[in-house]
Amino acid sequence: MSRELWSSRTGFILAAAGSAVGLGNIWKFPYLAGKFGGGAFLLAYLILVFTIVKVVMLSEIAIGRAANKNAVGAFASLHNRRWKIVGYMGVVACFMVLSFYSVVAGWTIYYTVEMVSGSLSGLQPDALTGKFEEFIADPSLPVIYHGIFMLMVIAIVIRGIKGGIEKVSTLLMPALFIIIIALILRGFMLDGAMKGLEFYLVPDWSQLGDFDLWSAALGQAFFSLSLGMGTMLTYGSYLDKKENLPNTSFQVAFIDTAVAFLAGLLVFPAVFSFGFDNTAGPGLTFIILPAVFNQMFGGQLFGILFFILLFFAALTSAISILEVMTSYWSEEKGVCRKKSAVIFGLLTFFMGVACSYSLGIWADVTLSSILGINIDLEVFNLGVFDFLDYVSSNILLPLGGLLILIFAGWIKPKRIMDEITNNGKVDFYWKNAFIIMTKYISPIAIGYLLLNSIGII
Ligand code: PFF
């Protein structure tokens, strides 16, 4: 059976950018930057994306297109069955990421509804914080929204790449961009906005010596660019053989990074202007932005539009995650696409329920508490939501990326280089830099930061 392809190069770029741009940019990036000192985190992030991580992106897309297969099948068809393990790890990471991702995506639906009803209008920052905390800890409401979101993801993935995934992405990305710019301009006019800009744009150099900051920035770069878990590989596998991979992958990385950068410009002026704590964590975007909307002329309308677009950004990312699991199961095991999407979708939904409960009624459930032992390592003492987030972003994705680099740099260097250059037809002007980065610099840097995340260094 011949596989579907994207209908155009723009179709791929928009779909891949649709996968990359999501909650990671607008929800996660600002709160991590806030936690790790603003400017220093931004700088570390930019350095990593445009050096070490960029080559993972290109390698991953090239492996997908070379094999023209799903994440698990690709490694087996290009080399041997043992390498399937990288694909399997990706599928597991997808399951973990999508379960908490869908919960947060559900929050965007709730906030859209609240914006429409006007119930956040006029609330003071403290009240907005209280409302957010009360909502995420509720045992039923977030689960309902999470379920609604998951149903939509399943419905779209069942339709396949052209009918479903590509169409949704094409329209929404540009709209999101425009509304973020409008909101940033309003944020700049707030009293005290400059302090926020300074925090975000001027690095405190001393913080760059902190390896936890670099590990967090690396994990975030993988998460934000949808790397290390087979997503870009799977999307690359639907890409036409004539396309220019170096340019295409650069464009996707650039768009994604631009949106993350803008999200910081959006959030920090307001954080400082309203006197919020910049280390507030996952609630940051959800609490700060309604406070900005409350200060704006036409704020309610902006609020509604913003949360709708954030919801769509989350949707295009979530689709790409479920697609990895679905294409694996349907191509490798012959299960029909529909059944595969529904079953993986449901499993993820149940895990997501546990994530959501861990922010309320199951707050005390940690690995330590389940195993009944007391271990002083961070991973053992996180709730389900934070545990899945930490293990996927800080461990599984970089590990997947590391293995992808070893594959592209050491196992099949010629095959991957031929793919990247379309058998010599593409002018790949940073070819030598790519080879050195893929073989040596990136794997060593990623390996080092990975050991730091696991707690070995
Ligand atoms: N990149 C997405 C975001 O930033 O929201 C999340 C994501 C999608 C992560 C796909 C991983 C993935 F494979």
Image (tube, helix red, strand yellow):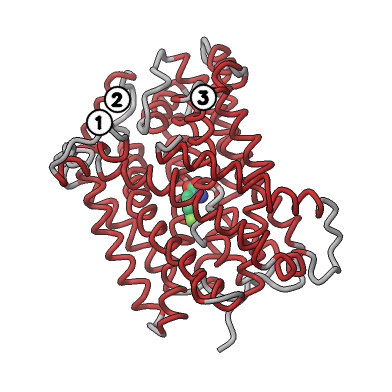
Label 3 with label 2: CB-CB less than 8 Å = no
Q: Residues within 10 Å of mark 3 (few under 14, many from 20)?
A: few
- Cα distance between the residues tagged 2 and 1: 6 Å
- Please state which amino acid type lies under the numbered disc 3: Asp
- Cα distance between the residues tagged 1 and 3: 30 Å
| Element marked by disc 3 | loop
Residue receiving disc 1: 133
- Whether residue 170 appears in this view of the structure is no
Q: Residue furthest bottom?
A: 1
Which circle, 3 or 2, is nearer the viewer? 3
> In percent of the image, x 77 and y 71: which residue is there?
242
> Foreground: 421 or 316?
421
- Please state which amino acid type lies under the numbered disc 1: Glu
| Element marked by disc 1 | helix
> In the drawing, does residue 73 fall left or right of residue 422?
left
Whichever of labels 1 and 3 marks the residue nearer the N terminus, that label is 1
| Element marked by disc 2 | helix
Whichever of labels 3 and 2 marks the residue nearer the N terminus, that label is 2
> Foreground: 12 or 205?
205
> In percent of the image, x 46 and y 36: which residue is there?
452
> In percent of the image, x 39 and y 52: which residue is there?
97
Q: Residues within 10 Å of mark 1 (few under 14, many from 20)?
A: some
**Picture coordinates of residue 372, whole percent (x, y):** 13, 42
- Please state which amino acid type lies under the numbered disc 2: Thr
